Image: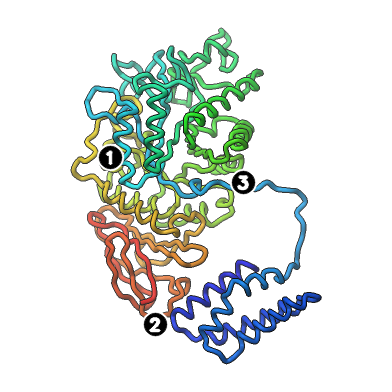
Amino acid sequence: MILKAHRRRHDLGKRVEAGQDVAGELREGARLVRKAAARARGRSAERGSLLDAAAGLEGGGPQEERARLATSSALAELMRRLSPRAPVSRYDRELTVVVDRPAARHTTWYELFPRSQGRTPGRHGTFDDCIARLDDIRAMGFDVVYLPPIHPIGRTNRKGRDNRLAADPGDPGSPWVIGNEHGGHTAIEPALGTLEDFHRFVAAARERGIEIALDYAIQCSPDHPWVREHPEWFHHRPDGTIKYAENPPKKYQDIYPINFDTPAWTSLWHELRRVLEFWIEQGVTIFRVDNPHTKPLPFWQWVIGEVQQKRPDVLFLAEAFTRSKLMRALAKVGFTESYTYFTWRTTKAELTEYLTELTQTEVREYMRGNLFTNTPDILPPHLQEGGRAAFKSRVALAATLSSVYGIYSGYELCENVARPGVEEYANNEKYEIRVRDWDAPGHIKDYIARLNAIRRAHPALQGYKNLGFHQTDDDAVLFYGKMTPDGRDTVLVAVNLDPKGPRETTLHLPLDALGIGADQPYHVRDLLREETRPGRGPVHRVRLDPEDEPAFIFAVGPA
């Protein structure tokens, strides 16, 4: 009831601004105010104020003055106190409400491998190299830098380039193979630097308005100290040897998975909590959790609750590409954000159906989807085949469909070379050190920076639950918009989903929702090109050229 009243006041203000006759709406408002006055039994002062307000709404004064009375905060508060309470029921239990900080709803992620941030081929990157990259990352508009594991990397059965079973001398191994003689989950790979170097990196990022997210991967190399100190935390074969990880037909001879069914689960859980607490003390405020769906849900409910009881500002992103039901269960036990299947949704129908499910059904009340365009594991076919145009359209979609999205470094350079027959990068950075020219010809850094600047400037794009899809006449063009609850900011977006050529189509603008009459003139402000053009009527023609500008991001307002 209260939300409907707020919407009525907002719509009335829009109509007055547009110069429309609102006499009928004011009479309707007066009738509602008189009904509220009738409920004010024994509250003569409030009843008198409401009757005076009703008379003012029906009076013969200027329409603008009566509209100001109708939309005044004083009248709204009186109406709120006397709003009808029936039917009212009491829920049979008390619920806990968890309120995340704003960054849980609106952040822009950039994933990088610290060891690849140097400028000299063959040299292992350091945290100092990461500091040198921060200005470039911030200039693109990112406010979260996510690091894969930064811990010592195992030597036993170390994988070579492109996941070869045998490593060559000097191959660095996968960062997700954690632990060697230098330590485990609370240690730093010596080639990256020291703990003090990491502190300087975190401080430098904070100075630029960037938070550090760290990977939390619960698995070990055979060389991890836990293998020697706590063999009871692992799976054993009948001969007493420890089992390595398998995901048939894949085998991971370099990784030992943790046994959560161990009788020593209490000590295991407390140690895993201690790892999180250690990195929080070092300045980490966000954790990207690797494969949480392969660990027990009760563990996540416990450890996230334990951490956030002391540090409610700490956020958790679930990297769980698994069954929808399990992804939702992880969100319900405490994960702040979740990876999504956006990475593979490419058609208008697929995107509409999936994003509607995420943002407009009951799922939105407990699960917040982070739209990553790519990951070190995932180079989807549309990026392999669509060229620079596909990279621009996909990042435009991710940046405007959700209030949280991310890219994996190299995306801005439109890197699209895959291993034959798989959705994975060739010369994969998981297994080797890469040195890039971050200003190489053909990059889209400036384009990404413009998108992220629009996200920062428009509160509508910082909302997660306010997505709505609109009609367009072309199945290769997706048209949607976002509006703030008070209606003060609205952003509309049309994106060409076909990277092969331009599309011309008609957009059907939601003029009613914008408070604009069917014949009323208005202006269309192109937010990417920073141009304004006149408009009239509910249809608007656009041409979207994927090589030039695959997206039309705009605002509509009264002329």
Q: Quadrant of residue 556?
A: bottom left
Task: Give the color scheme: rainbow, by chain, secondary structure or one colour.
Answer: rainbow
For residue 532, above or below residue 33: above
Residue, disc 2: 519
Q: How crowded is mark 3: few (under 14 residues within 10 Å), some or many (20 or more)?
A: few
Image side of residue 168 versus residue 268, left or right: left
Image side of residue 427 versus residue 12, left or right: left
Q: How far apart are marks 1 and 2 (CA)?
A: 47 Å
Residue reaching furthest to the bottom? 60
* Residue at 41 percent of width and 26 percent of height: 150
Among the two numbered marks 3 and 1 on one chain, the one whose residue lies closer to the N terminus: 3
Image side of residue 336 versus residue 440, left or right: right
* Residue at 72 percent of width and 76 percent of height: 46
Q: In which quarter of the image is residue 6?
A: bottom right
- Amino acid type shown at disc 3: Val
For residue 347, above or below residue 439: below
Residue, disc 3: 98
Among the two numbered marks 3 and 2 on one chain, the one whose residue lies closer to the N terminus: 3
Q: How far apart are marks 3 and 1 (CA)?
A: 40 Å
Looking at the rendered image, the disc whose residue lies closer to the viewer, 3 or 1, is: 3
Q: Residue 416's mark?
A: 1
* Residue at 44 percent of width and 25 percent of height: 249
Q: Do the residues labelled 3 and 1 touch (CB within 8 Å)?
A: no
101 vs 152, nearest the viewer: 101
Query: What is the x, y in percent for residue 345?
Result: 41, 49
**Residue 374 visible in this rendered orientation of the protein:** no
Q: Is mark 3 on a helix, strand or loop?
A: loop
3 vs 373, nearest the viewer: 3
- Amino acid type shown at disc 1: Asn
Q: How far apart are marks 3 and 2 (CA)?
A: 46 Å
